[in-house]
């Protein structure tokens, strides 16, 4: 398909590295792994640069591949028998300045305890501010499934927050 | 399922899940990796390119040699055709001269009779 837009790889990295890294970080709760995934995603983008048609397509493509690579990484870890969510404080070794607030850090820890499909839906909903339709398109999942994951994930996260974060959360 | 408007908890989530800045080293490492990968790819393609060039050179040489050979054969064919034409002309001329000689001989014999 012919298109006029000529993507600049370096510029795309500058624009989207924060998004890709944050998606991978919230999905894996592992900084090192998230950085590795982000690199893999951008390397794949480099190989597929000719197929990218517009800035919006680049953003959509990066989101989809970042989520897919993160899910792959989690599956590989499960196969190797490593439980990601046992020692979250140790694994989620972000530096202090990276954390916006203690509440953010605690919510991220609680998010990491959710099942992967619910976590994916919530991350896309609240980090990327996507609609359920956009999430379904990004995850290549049926809309009803995405809505169910959002509803259950939010309910579960709310319940966990009520138990663990009473001192922080107003609406929980 | 109605997702809008967001309640307090969802707004807290939105704030908590704001994008994190990527590590400053991410881009540098990525660009290094990209450079290395391109070099590796170029090196991997080099033997293939060498074979391609060799094959192209052989093909070109064969085409040139064929062309020269064809020219030589064509030149010979033309020369032979020209020679045949000259021989035919000579045969015609000889035949005409023979007829002429025969007539002259007959003419010389005629007054004596």
Image: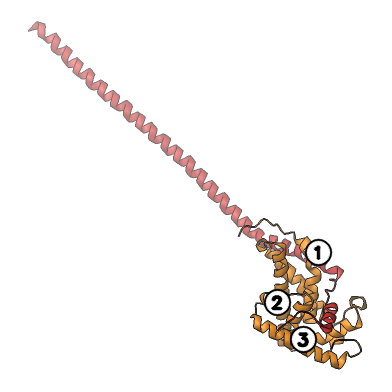
- Closer-to-camera residue (B26/A131): A131
Q: Residue at x 55, y 50 (%)?
A: B58
Task: Give the x, y percent position of residue B73.
Answer: 42, 39
Residue labelled with disc 3: A154
Q: Could you tell me which chain the residue with mark 2 belongs to?
A: A
Residue at the image position 68 percent from the left and 63 percent from the top? A52
Observer able to see residue A107: yes
Height in image: A67 above or below B83?
below
The residue that appears at 89% across and 91% down in the rendered structure is A166
Q: Quadrant of the N terminus of chain B?
A: bottom right
Q: Secondary structure at mark 3?
A: helix
Front residue of this view, candidates B26 and A107: A107
Image quadrant where residue A157 sits: bottom right
Q: Residue furthest bottom?
A: A163
Mark 2 in CB contact with mark 3 (< 8 angstroms):
no
Q: Are marks 2 and 1 on the same chain?
A: yes
Looking at the rendering, in which quadrant would you find the C terminus of chain B? top left
Q: Residue furthest top?
A: B111
Q: Is residue A55 left or right of residue B72?
A: right
Numbered mark located on residue B52 in the image: none
Point out residue A141 in the picture as x, y percentages from the top left corner: 65, 80
For disc 1, the marked residue is A14
In this rendering, would A112 be left or right of A167? left
Judge if badges 1 and 3 mark residues of a common chain. yes
Q: Which residue is mark 2?
A: A135
The alpha-carbon separation of the residues under discs 2 and 3 comes to 15 Å
Residue A24 is situated, as x and y percent measured from the top left of the image, at 77, 77
| Badge 1 element | helix
Q: Quadrant of residue B50?
A: bottom right
């Amino acid at each position: 398909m012919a298109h006029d837009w000529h993507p600049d790889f370096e510029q795309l990295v500058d624009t989207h590295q924060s998004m890709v890294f944050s998606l991978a970080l919230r999905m894996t709760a592992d900084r090192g792994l998230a950085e590795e995934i982000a690199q893999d995603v951008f390397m794949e983008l480099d190989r597929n640069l000719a197929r990218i048609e517009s800035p919006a397509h680049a953003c959509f493509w990066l989101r989809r591949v970042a989520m897919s690579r993160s899910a792959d990484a989690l599956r590989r870890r499960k196969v190797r028998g490593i439980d990601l969510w046992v020692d979250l404080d140790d694994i989620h070794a972000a530096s202090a300045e990276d954390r916006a607030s203690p509440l953010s850090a605690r919510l991220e820890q609680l998010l990491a305890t959710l099942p992967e499909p619910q976590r994916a839906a919530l991350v896309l909903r609240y980090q990327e501010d996507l609609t359920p339709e956009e999430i379904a398109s990004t995850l290549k999942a049926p809309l009803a499934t995405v809505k169910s994951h959002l509803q259950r994930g939010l309910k579960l996260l709310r319940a966990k927050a009520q138990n663990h974060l009473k001192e922080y959360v107003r609406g929980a | 399922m109605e997702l809008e408007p967001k309640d307090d908890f969802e707004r807290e989530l939105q704030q908590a899940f704001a994008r994190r800045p990527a590590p400053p080293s991410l881009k540098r490492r990525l660009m290094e990796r990209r450079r290395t990968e391109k070099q590796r790819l170029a090196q991997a393609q080099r033997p293939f390119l060498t074979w391609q060039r060799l094959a192209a050179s052989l093909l070109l040489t064969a085409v040139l040699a064929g062309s020269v050979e064809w020219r030589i054969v064509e030149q010979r064919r033309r020369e032979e055709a020209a020679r045949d034409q000259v021989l035919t002309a000579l045969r015609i001329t000889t035949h005409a001269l023979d007829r002429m000689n025969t007539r002259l001989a007959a003419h010389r014999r005629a007054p004596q009779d």
